[in-house]
Image (cartoon, helix red, strand yellow):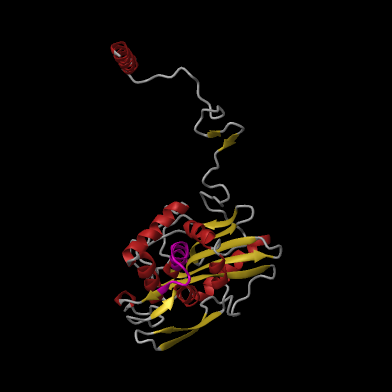
Amino acid sequence: MNYINRRKRLICLTGSILLAACLCTGCGGPSYEMPYHVDYDVSSFNVVTRHETRTAVPFAAGLCVSASDVPSDTVDMSQAEAAGLFGLEDCQVLYAKNIHERLHPASLTKVMTALVALKYGQLNQNLTASDAVTITESGAVLCGLKRGDTMSLDQALRILLVYSANDVAMLIAENVGGSVERFVEMMNQEAVRLGATNTHFMNPHGLTESEHYTTVYDLYLIFNEAIKYETFNEIIHMSGYQTVYYDKNGKEKGFDKPTTNQFLKGEQQAPANVTVIGGKTGTTSAAGYCLMLFSRDANGSPFISIVLRAEGAAQLYSEMIDLLEEIHN
């Protein structure tokens, strides 16, 4: 037994001496004699298994990427601050103007609100309104919710995206996030996860706050994620929505409103080779007129198009049509 204990102490002592020697050798820091190359099996760029070597997938694989403007002689974007056209099938940026400029997004914010709600909520979840739904800002679009009103998350998402009701955005945020503040944190966390690093949300509806901003490119990233949800695609394609929800006493309250999207209402026509699946509108004095669309060409290829801060509604749709015409130019 004594022999075994002495042997253990000897091994520990020897290990300590070797460790000290390693730490003291080269006081200027450790040196490595082995040359480094990303193709080596030990490179962090490669994942080595018993049977194969696989290269790590870059973060932007499968995404459109552009660091600068992509102009076109056929697109007139003179009356908008920023715009982009993104081909999802081949990951091409077909047009870009100021796509990394931070701007107010107005109600395009609600796409992120819907995305977070779809990711963390349940469509059959019952939502109950608190005083948080009381919005007094002049001109704000409202469903007319009062404290104690109830509806499902499915109903709320349809009112949110079809009619763009700001009080419904607050209803969703408080019930899905536990509080509006926590839900906004979830929105910002999701933005970071998607790589939307020029985005910061302050609320779930898009009414103007100085530190509430995003970019055309970040909106593309957010919209590109949202259209992965079947329910989202169904809702943004609706030309209107009619439903019944309930007040605090269980009395029915009716809702019946058309979409805010002029393409879906038949007031604007997309180019002959393009079908507008749906999208989101947004307007405030700070953001100007904004529109984001999901469309397909005659072959079914998908595209996202975005116009921010147009000078008026007529200019917004005119410039969006110019953008859509670029799909097969």
- Which residue occupies the extreme front position in the image? 1
Task: Please name the residue shown 65% across and 69% down the image.
Answer: 275
| Residue 118 rendering spot, x and y as whole percentages | 47, 65
Quick check: 306 above or below 239? above
| Residue 72 rendering spot, x and y as whole percentages | 60, 58
| Residue 183 rendering spot, x and y as whole percentages | 36, 63
Tally of numbered discs = 0
Q: Is residue 111 magenta?
A: yes
Relative to 173, is 195 on the left or the right? right
Q: Nearer the viewer, residue 7 or 154?
A: 7
Q: In this picture, which residue range is highlighted in magenta?
A: 110-126
Task: Please name the residue shown 46% across and 71% down the image.
Answer: 282
Task: Please name the residue shown 35% across and 59% down the image.
Answer: 185
The image quadrant where one finds the C terminus is bottom right
Which SS does the magenta portion mostly show? helix
- Which residue occupies the extreme bottom position in the image? 251
Task: Please name the residue shown 51% across and 28% down the image.
Answer: 42
| Residue 139 rendering spot, x and y as whole percentages | 38, 79
When asked about the image quadrant of residue 8, the answer is top left
Quick check: 265 above or below 87? below
The image quadrant where one finds the N terminus is top left
Q: Is residue 115 magenta?
A: yes
- Which residue occupies the extreme top position in the image? 3
| Residue 200 appears in view | no
Q: Nearer the viewer, residue 160 or 120?
A: 120
Quick check: 131 above or below 48? below
When asked about the image quadrant of residue 325, the answer is bottom right
| Residue 327 appears in view | yes
